[in-house]
Image (spheres, rainbow, N blue to C red):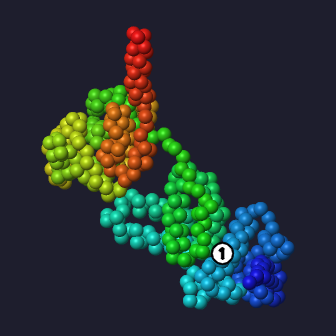
Amino acid sequence: MKRTFKVLFFVRKPKNYSDGTVPIYLRLTVDGERVEWHTQRECDPERWNAQAGRMIGTKQDAKSVNAWLEQLHVQVFDTQRHLAHMGKEPTALAIRNKIQGKGDEKVHTLIEVFEYHNEQFAQLVGKDFAPGTLKKFKTALAALQNFITWKFSVRDVAITQVNHQFITDYEFYLKSIHGVQHNTAMGMIKKLKKIIRQCVANDWLAKDPFLSYKIKTRETHRAFLLEKDLELLANKHFPTDRLNLVKDLFLFSCFTGLSYSDVAELSSTDIAIGIDREMWIHTRRTKTDTNSRIPLLPTALSIIEKYKDHPKVQAEGRLFPCISNQRMNSYLKEISDCLGLQKELTFHCARHTFATTVTLTNGVPIETVSKMLGHRSLRTTQQYAKILDVKVSNDMQVLKDRFAIKAGTKSAI
């Protein structure tokens, strides 16, 4: 059945009006049935374009009001489609009631749903998720709240207002106003996508707005140390105990591939005899909660031996006397300057060094490296795997030698 459907925005002057702003109303007409409601916005009648149904001007107040009206316009049509999808009659009254939260069905709002997700997520930290992941969701929620306030001058919006335009505007805000890099912005949008998918699964949204939006991350150049850098660092003795401790913990990660949080949690019970009768680390990764089995190389073993009698190690039952990750990275910058390294050192750089310089460059298969790193997917390991020129040279030398042998055989014939 074909329906007549019309949306009109207009201003209404109260009785005895003299000057000042007046309320903006939305009039919805479906098959002759007409309903009106206040949009919660006001405008000076002199700045209202009745034909366009929008506020005149390019100032921020006009942009904010017009953006809000545009979202309401989209919300009306999204609500109409949602009601039809749910098998309900999309009358003018039903659409207005759903938008305003009247009747049996509750109108779910984006920030409300996001906050509920984070509350549930927090209860699973330490069981299914790491604290760092919750922190990222909280950061994404704060950015989303700021965006909504910036764009619509309100704290929250109905989830039916989230469409392709909303997402692209959010991406623009994150990069231009919030000032984050492309991959960071994509990470925040991924978290919004998770919330929206839950809304679609609960039939709160008739259509997934992410169907026409692709999240694309850019390849990053991850810093890692070359073999000569490792030797330079290992042979360097610093005048302060704090820098020598940071150096040792960083080197330990370079030769085990463990992250800062994993190193900080290590205890003597995590060291066991492996299948080869040598010493191994048997632990579970803090971030992914996956098993990680790592044979201890001589450098890593010597660092463990160095700190076994440290008072803090004895008192806390840890393998090392760790400091905070923030201080660790601050001291690593100091170490980098002392060594004259032309790269920014962070503790995570050690994990890349293990994957690249220590293992893959020395012929360890990527599947083995992935298992030691505790990755769930080989694709994750491939992001760490930078094939160095020296490995390319060595591999090609084998090929050159084969061609040389063939050429010599032909000459002899």
**In the rendered view, does 247 fall on the left or right side of 142?**
left
The residue lying at 76 percent from left, 89 percent from top is: 33
Residue beneath label 1, please?
Answer: 78
Q: Nearer the viewer, residue 382 or 103?
A: 382
Q: On screen, 1 above or below 200?
A: below
Q: Quadrant of residue 75?
A: bottom right
Residue 346, image x and y in percent?
Answer: 39, 42
Residue 397, image x and y in percent?
Answer: 40, 22
Residue 72 visible within the image? no
Amino acid on which the number 1 mark rests in the picture: Asp
**In the rendered view, does 268 fall on the left or right side of 289?**
left
The residue lying at 59 percent from left, 53 percent from top is: 175
Task: Answer few, some or many: residues within 10 Å of disc 1's Cα (few below 14, many 20 plus, some between 14 and 19).
Answer: many
Q: Nearer the viewer, residue 390 or 69?
A: 390
Q: Quadrant of residue 157?
A: bottom right
Residue 282, image x and y in percent?
Answer: 22, 50
For label 1, the SS is: helix
Instruction: Count all numbered tags in the image, as a single digit.
Output: 1
